[in-house]
Amino acid sequence: MFEARVYCERRKRLREEVKNGIVLLPGNEESPMNYSSNTYHFRQDSSFLYFFGIDQPGMAGIIDIDRNEDLLFGNDTDLESVIWMGPQPSVKELGLMTGTEKTYPYQDIEKIVNDAAKKGRKIHFLPPYRAENKIFLEKLTGINYSEINKKISEELIKAVVKLRSVKELWEIKEIEKAVDVAHEMHTTAMKMAMPGTYEKEIAGRIEGISLSHGTPVSFPVILTINGHILHNHYHGNMLREGRMMVTDAGHETSLRYASDITRSVPVGGKFSQRQKDIYEIVLHSLIQATELTRPGIPNRDIHLEAAAVIAAGLKDLGLMKGDVREAVNRGAHALFFPHGLGHMMGLDVHDMEGLGEDYVGYDNEIKRSDTFGLKGLRLGRRLKEGFVLTIEPGIYFIPPLIDKWRSEKKFTDFINYNKVETYKDFGGIRIEDDVLVTAEGRRLLGRPVPKTVREIEETMAK
């Protein structure tokens, strides 16, 4: 964990944003795979981590706004647990590590929350995403399980989003550590992307690299020759010459900060002319979007500029036609680029998505579109110094979507369906970097992963 002063300062800033009442922050519990003592890898709740820093199950925290105090709840390890797990810090010791002097047995949280409720004090809590935490909140607050999400504190959500959106120096350093491991993962995947290799061999190897650094991947590895399936976790295909392999993968550090990098490479190590043509359009879109990234500019505008670069490039290849700006304004480009340009990243790979995407990526000025393609943009609001985000344009040839739009005669003024038909076996290409918004503009985080055609071919030739 960070130094105690970091968590003290974060809780102090939260008290400045929330007017009154108590803030209830339950941590996560172990989650069994098939019986109670055989659990999935433990992952602490990110907001609890942000404010209390303790990465173990059976913990909860309260930030009392009115009384200007912090309370930590948990139980000390008993002898039986010590036999299996070894000696563990006491709750008192954990509290001191995060600047929390008042610690209590875990069961005491029920009495304290009940007392606050009886006195009519506001009880703030965030949207729970695990069933056991919904049940826990029902027990503490008396609110029916099915009504919990209707009683979440919008005031607290907005306060947490405000604090967590702007990354502190030590957070940025952690993210850069995660990107450096992702560099090793992705260059390894490139070198292994040869005909006759199975996707699962490469996916297993790069996940192993993450684990060899002490912690798991930041999300399940996406690695596929069917890159037109955006979140493809199937790894059973054999790599064949003429296909592109898309790898979307990142590392999570010991403090739970994420990286999220995507690279697309030609199986065998050499781009064909057709692959190179599409790849260069995506790369140009990425470079253009990165250069536009700076404080004050709406990320929605950057997304639309990236889309215009893609549409112009596809028009040069004869896949699109007509006025490029009008095509983008009407959403014709979304046949090839159906998702958003990127998202916030930090303690969560899609940072704070559990609090509600519209709270994180939008605000009173910029609202989410309901247009196909643009509605998939997770981050549309104006960028601020300290934001960490991904930039990940792509071009995909999705046969069912092509067939549907063609049958509907959709955007025939902008799409050359006869030419598009010849690309239905192409798959997809996505390129993604992790970027920090700085006062001057932006900075690429971590060790740069090869992404030009030359860099990729040279890496794969080693």
Image (tube, grey):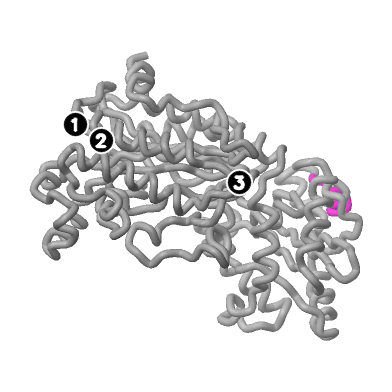
Above or below, 267 against 121 in this view is above
For marks 2 and 3, give the CA distance.
30 Å
Above or below, 377 against 238 in this view is below
Residue in view at x 49 percent, y 65 percent: 367
Cβ atoms at labels 2 and 1 below 8 Å apart: yes
Q: Which of the marked residues, 3 or 1, is nearer the chain's N terminus?
A: 1
The part of the image, by quadrant, that contains residue 395 is: top left
Residue in view at x 46 percent, y 54 percent: 300
Q: Which residue is mark 3?
A: 387
In percent of width and height, residue 199 lies at: 32, 35
87 relative position to 337: left or right: right
Residue in view at x 81 percent, y 84 percent: 120
Q: Of the numbered discs in the image, which one, if any, rests on residue 278?
A: 2
For marks 2 and 1, give the CA distance.
7 Å
Q: Quadrant of the C terminus?
A: top left
108 relative position to 307: left or right: right
In percent of width and height, residue 385 lies at: 64, 44
Task: Tell me where the magenta segment starts and ends, as one range.
Answer: 88-95
The part of the image, by quadrant, that contains residue 331 is: bottom left
Residue 285 or 359: which is nearer the viewer?
Answer: 285
Amino acid found under the numbered disc labelled 1: Arg
In percent of width and height, residue 142 lies at: 70, 83
Q: Which of the marked residues, 2 or 3, is nearer the chain's N terminus?
A: 2
Amino acid found under the numbered disc labelled 3: Phe
227 relative position to 241: left or right: right
Secondary structure under tag 1 reads helix
Secondary structure under tag 2 reads helix
| Secondary structure mostly seen in the magenta stretch | helix
